Image: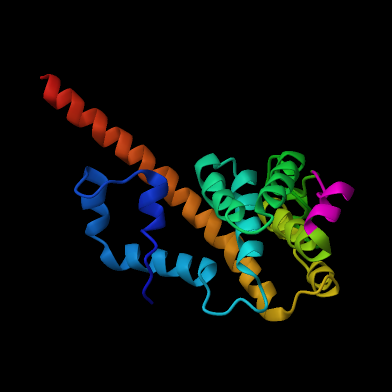
Amino acid sequence: MTSSTPDVIDLLAGIHTGSFVDRIRAERPETRANAQKSYLALFEPVQEVDFLRVERLAVAAFVAGLHDARAVAEFYTAGIIETTGGASLAAAVRAEVEKGRTHGPYGKYLAGPLSVEDKSGLIFEVSDFGRVALGTRLSAALDHSHLLVFRPREASPAALQKLLDAGWNTTAIVTLSQIVAFLAFQIRVVRGLSALSKAGEGTLASAAAE
């Protein structure tokens, strides 16, 4: 897959060509390439009939906001703003992030040995104002994304049916789940590489001072 898009993880982690972390990433070229290919497949799809790119960006911005990954959220929000009517959509997504922020994971398991780990928490639903701004389809996607981030133990056929009722088909639902999972991966990698980069810079600064 070819694209003019720069390596997104490098961009978000502030990795520069030839830097300490760039050299480390270069030692695992397949890992680096596959992460970028995953991004391109999810956010630069060849076809977007079942799941529009702006919807994908909105879900990504929402999920990154829930993870309190500000730089990542801003990256996807910038993509939303570039679209027609994107500024109002981005504002609506930000408002739902503020409403949906909480701590997890929590939720209930099916009755059995794991029930001892049941934990109550926020049952998120997009606000009435948000449903007007986002529409039924995208509102359902954000509701489900919040469930996957904070209450994965409550994922169920009934939860999937809500997406189907809102106009999502099975292919798009799979992609939605992939986006939520990819964001969790991308955010962890960016945070780890950013910390490694700062540590490397600190070591180099100390060495230079000596």
The image quadrant where one finds the C terminus is: top left
Residue 66 drawn at (x, y percent)? 65, 45
> Image check: 64 left or right of 17?
right
> Image check: 209 left or right of 128?
left
- Residue pictured at 32% horizontal, 40% vertical: 196
Can you name the residue that lies furthest to the right here? Answer: 128
Can residue 125 be seen in this snapshot? no
> Image check: 201 left or right of 162?
left
In the image, residue 95 lies in the stretch drawn in magenta: no
Q: Coloured how?
A: rainbow
Residue 24 drawn at (x, y percent)? 24, 51
- Residue pictured at 68% horizontal, 44% vertical: 104
Residue 131 drawn at (x, y percent)? 84, 55
In this view, the residue in front, 74 or 147, is 74
In the displayed structure, would residue 104 be above or below residue 185?
above
In the displayed structure, would residue 99 be above or below residue 43?
above
Can you name the residue that lies furthest to the front here? Answer: 84
The image quadrant where one finds the N terminus is: bottom left
> For the image shown, how many numbered marks are present on the structure?
0
In the image, residue 128 lies in the stretch drawn in magenta: yes
The residue range painted magenta reads 122-134
